[in-house]
Amino acid sequence: MLKIRNAVRTDLEFLVRIDLKNDGYTVSNKLDLTDSEKKDHCKKIERFLTERDRGAILMEDTGSHNPIAMIMYSIANRDTTYPWKTIYSELDRALFQSDGRFMEIFQLWVHPDYRRLGLATKLKLKLEEEARNRHVDLIYTHTEQSNHHVIELNKKIGYEEVRRGSIWDDVIRVSLIKKL
Ligand SMILES: CC(C)(COP(=O)(O)OP(=O)(O)OC[C@H]1O[C@@H](n2cnc3c(N)ncnc32)[C@H](O)[C@@H]1OP(=O)(O)O)[C@@H](O)C(=O)NCCC(=O)NCCS
């Protein structure tokens, strides 16, 4: 049986390992990390377990107690200038709630043995509950243009494409949002 639960500190190693896989990305900038880079990466992921405006939801196999799928998210703001490249300000302000807050998906992954069973869909629907609980009415995600199946997955549950283009490198990414 599978159960959905919020990630806790003891899940850090799993989240770090999965994030480092770069599964679903054509361009990897995280391989062959130095020890210091590994430490920084771990700290970055740990923030999803400790900060109020971030979180991670896992799906766990209750037999083995192993996590087999996860989604990570943060609450961002359309009107904030971030120290990294974002395209939020290019998106129509009218799409966003008055305080500019929205939820951004950071990572989505399902173990290869459990794919095409609707688990990613379930996690994304669970995320919608989380967004509503946090009084946020828009979820943003992006994926590489070549990930047709991820685009399809999103569109099937009501996401719409709002932008297509490069963001921080030459890769063309498709930005999708869902208004709740
Ligand atoms: C993308 C990923 C999260 C999908 O997880 P999943 O649990 O298999 O997805 P779901 O079962 O909820 O799929 C829902 C729908 O999306 C589409 N879809 C998902 N994976 C697909 C695939 N490999 N090929 C074609 N369509 C696919 C289908 O329409 C599917 O519905 P169907 O199975 O009834 O045809 C999973 O393949 C994965 O972890 N990939 C590696 C990481 C990754 O790419 N993450 C996203 C980065 S942006």
Image (cartoon, rainbow, N blue to C red):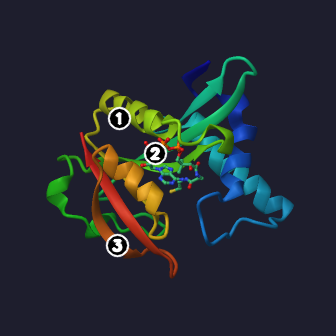
Residue farthest toward the front in the current orientation of the protein: 116
| Real-space Cα separation, disc 3 to disc 1, in angstroms | 23 Å
In the image, which disc is placed on residue 128? 1
Q: Earlier in the sequence, mark 3 or mark 1?
A: 1
**What residue is at 72 percent from the left and 17 percent from the top?**
63
Residue 179 position within the rendered picture, expressed as x and y whole percent measured from the top left: 23, 45
Q: Is residue 134 left or right of residue 108?
A: left
- At numbered mark 3, what does the secondary structure look like: helix, strand or loop? strand
Q: Are marks 1 and 2 in contact (CB under 8 Å)?
A: no
Rendered view: 80 above or below 165 = above
Q: Amino acid at mark 1?
A: Glu
Give the residue type that dot 2 points to: Ser
Per the image, the residue denoted by label 3 is 164
Q: Residues within 10 Å of mark 1 (few under 14, many from 20)?
A: many
| Residue 140, placed above or below residue 53 | below
The numbered mark, 3 or 2, whose residue comes first in the sequence reads: 2
Does any portion of residue 7 appear in the rendered image? no
